[in-house]
Image: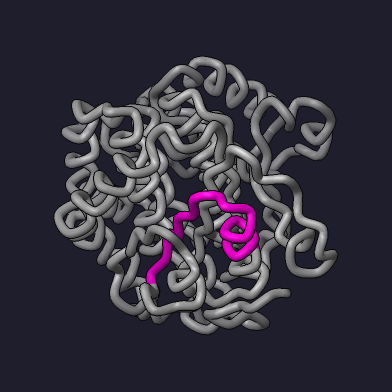
């Protein structure tokens, strides 16, 4: 595969995650200790890749901490000047750059209403970080490629650590400490099949399917495909896809499915088999042999990862797939057309 900045940054992720665990763990524990008992629900403001990390937070804090998470509507704060009542909320803003005015406006309003605020960012000197009561620093160094990769997995790891400490689930830390090695192994496993991505160089449309903890993974893979390849990729949960959109599937139609082991795997396998009957071209990410055997292009992730942290590994095949497909379509994965690294929206 042609080397690029993006390729380097994807491959940096095991060490970036290992460093985050070592450097930021104590800070995150202190933040959790300070915030525990001071809120009843969470409001998260984010855009783009960070918004997909926020979707992960909805499942994570709901399942592990029994805390409802709402995704903020930033334009209510920044454009309409009509913010909602944030009583009893913890306000979290996730932004790699910490620059976007609409996201900053949410944390500023949280302060105005007297609510605790937390910024998750890769720039601890950004406007977002300066406005927050607490900061989780992603410790990714500079992310030079336009498409976010290492800041996404670091955001997921940061949220997972915060959830563990907030709920005093310190026994789960041993599971999180396995993630850097699992991500490293994932990168090695991907190399077995990545050359076959050329099969899809003329694709114009596809869908990406996930559910549960990997519903956000579907959104993030779809975003990477759109950003890097000009392919119209639409994310769905398998449940929503059955309610009408499945009628779009025809012979040869590409469907990316994320189906690691967990509560939903057998349901996902049944769904995949139905897609196969419809003639779908299946690109499948899983650790399960039976699931992987259904695919024209299988991507294996390491077995044994608990479902709740599988998204940190499951995103990597999507990152590599998108980058390789861009190269096959004679596009520059480091300079996707029409977008910039820092996007500031009002």
User: 19 or 88: which is nearer to us?
Assistant: 88
Q: Is residue 270 above or below residue 124?
A: above
Q: Is residue 199 above or below residue 185?
A: below
- On the rendered structure, is 137 left or right of 276? left
Q: Quadrant of the N terminus?
A: bottom left
Q: What's the image's color scheme? A: one colour
* Tally of marks: 0
| Quarter holding residue 302 | top left
The spot of residue 178 in percent (x, y) is: 18, 40
The spot of residue 225 in percent (x, y) is: 58, 61
- On the rendered structure, is 21 left or right of 155? left
Q: Residue at x 79, y 59 (%)?
A: 76
> Can residue 200 be spotted in the picture?
no
The segment highlighted magenta reads 106-122
The spot of residue 270 in percent (x, y) is: 58, 17
User: 146 or 65: which is nearer to us?
Assistant: 65
User: 185 or 95: which is nearer to us?
Assistant: 95
Q: Residue at x 23, y 56 (%)?
A: 24
> Can residue 117 be spotted in the picture?
yes
Is 290 colored magenta in this rendering? no
Q: Residue at x 57, y 52 (%)?
A: 114
Q: Residue at x 77, y 32 (%)?
A: 246
| Quarter holding residue 17 | bottom left
The spot of residue 132 in percent (x, y) is: 46, 63
Is 111 colored magenta in this rendering? yes
Q: Quadrant of the C terminus?
A: bottom right
User: 169 or 304: which is nearer to us?
Assistant: 169
């Amino acid at each position: 595969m042609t080397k690029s900045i993006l390729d380097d940054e994807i491959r940096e992720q095991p060490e970036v995650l290992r460093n985050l665990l070592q450097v930021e763990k104590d800070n995150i524990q202190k933040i959790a200790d300070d915030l525990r008992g001071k809120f009843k629900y969470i409001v998260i403001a984010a855009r783009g890749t960070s918004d997909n990390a926020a979707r992960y937070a909805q499942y994570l804090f709901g399942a592990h901490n029994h805390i409802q998470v709402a995704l903020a509507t930033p334009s209510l704060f920044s454009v309409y000047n009509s913010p909602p009542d944030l009583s009893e909320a913890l306000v979290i803003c996730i932004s790699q750059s910490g620059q976007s005015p609409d996201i900053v406006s949410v944390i500023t309003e949280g302060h105005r209403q007297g609510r605790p605020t937390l910024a998750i960012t890769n720039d601890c000197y950004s406007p977002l970080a300066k406005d927050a009561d607490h900061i989780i620093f992603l410790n990714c160094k500079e992310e030079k490629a336009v498409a976010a990769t290492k800041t996404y997995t670091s955001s997921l790891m940061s949220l997972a650590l915060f959830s563990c400490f907030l709920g005093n689930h310190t026994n789960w830390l041993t599971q999180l400490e396995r993630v850097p090695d699992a991500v490293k192994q994932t990168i090695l496993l991907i190399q077995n099949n990545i050359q076959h991505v050329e099969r899809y160089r003329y694709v114009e449309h596809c869908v990406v399917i996930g559910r549960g903890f990997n519903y956000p993974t579907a959104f993030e893979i779809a975003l990477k495909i759109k950003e890097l390849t000009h392919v119209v990729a639409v994310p769905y949960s398998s449940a929503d896809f059955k309610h009408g959109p499945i009628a779009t599937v025809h012979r040869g139609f590409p469907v990316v499915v994320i189906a690691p082991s967990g509560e939903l795997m057998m349901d996902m396998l049944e769904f995949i088999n139905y897609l196969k009957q419809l003639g779908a071209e299946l690109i499948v990410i899983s650790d399960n042999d039976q699931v992987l055997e259904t695919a024209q292009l299988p991507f294996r992730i390491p077995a044994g990862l608990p479902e709740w942290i599988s998204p940190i590994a499951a995103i990597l095949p999507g990152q590599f797939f998108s980058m390789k497909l861009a190269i096959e379509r004679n596009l520059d994965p480091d300079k996707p057309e029409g977008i910039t690294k820092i996007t500031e929206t009002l």
